[in-house]
Image (spheres, rainbow, N blue to C red):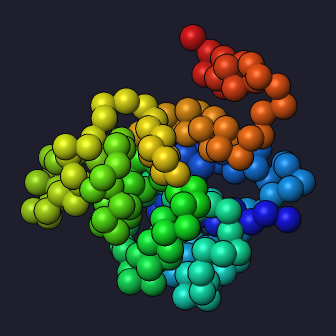
Amino acid sequence: MKKILCYLYEGFVDFEISLALTEINLDEKFQVIYAAYEKKLLKSSSGLTIKPDIAVSEITSSNDYEALIIPGGFVRPLKPEFKELILDFNKTNKLIAAICGGPEFLANAGLLENRKYTTSMFPSDYEEKNEPDPFPRKNYLETRVVRDAHIITARGNAFVDFALEIWDWFDLYEYDNEKEECKEIYSPV
């Protein structure tokens, strides 16, 4: 069974990843493993409580996983062990998908220096807190979702587009036009 790693932290925004992970979990070839800095209960932004399966410090390499998925949230601490894990996923060209504020982890790890990306975080978000903006803004695209090689980034309101890109990466569509049909079903005009 192929394992997908989903990194969680206190206050993560659950709706941004729920659609993507539901379809992955429904596929018998995949299993989502939830990781955090500690294996203690975490509360999402909507109040859901989840206990991670594994601590980040227990993961020795990306070899056991096919992808890393990171939701947005309001406080995004990047500890050295998670930075190393992100860099390991990048080195092996495995899928790294981050949405809303989640791309901040990638920016702080240096992954967006030579990649196109999008995010819901703006320079003003950092100015308000007197913090340096970690994003290389020259590579920012004002769009809902960006797929640059093995890295997918999305704005928070683009959780459907985010899910569809992840499903496309894993070839979860059964026929040629299914991605377009899913887009119509999940985000009707």
User: Which of the two residues, 39 or 26, is positioned nearer the viewer here?
Assistant: 26
Q: Looking at the image, which residue is at 44% across and 38% down? A: 146
Note whether 32 is above or below 137 in the view shown. below
Q: Where is residue 24 in the image (x, y as percent from the top left)?
A: 76, 50
Q: Looking at the image, which residue is at 71% across and 46% down? A: 170
Q: Looking at the image, which residue is at 81% across and 58% down? A: 30
User: Which of the two residues, 116 or 100, is positioned nearer the viewer here?
Assistant: 116
Q: Position of residue 92 (x, y in %)?
A: 55, 67
Q: Position of residue 47 (x, y in %)?
A: 57, 58
In the picture, which quadrant includes the C terminus? top right
Is residue 179 toward the left or the right of residue 128 in the image?
right
Is residue 144 toward the left or the right of residue 23 in the image?
left
In the picture, which quadrant includes the N terminus? bottom right
Note whether 66 is above or below 24 in the view shown. below
Is residue 36 toward the left or the right of residue 154 in the image?
right
On the question of residue 13 being in view, the answer is no
Q: Residue furthest right?
A: 28
Q: Looking at the image, which residue is at 52% across and 51% down? A: 150
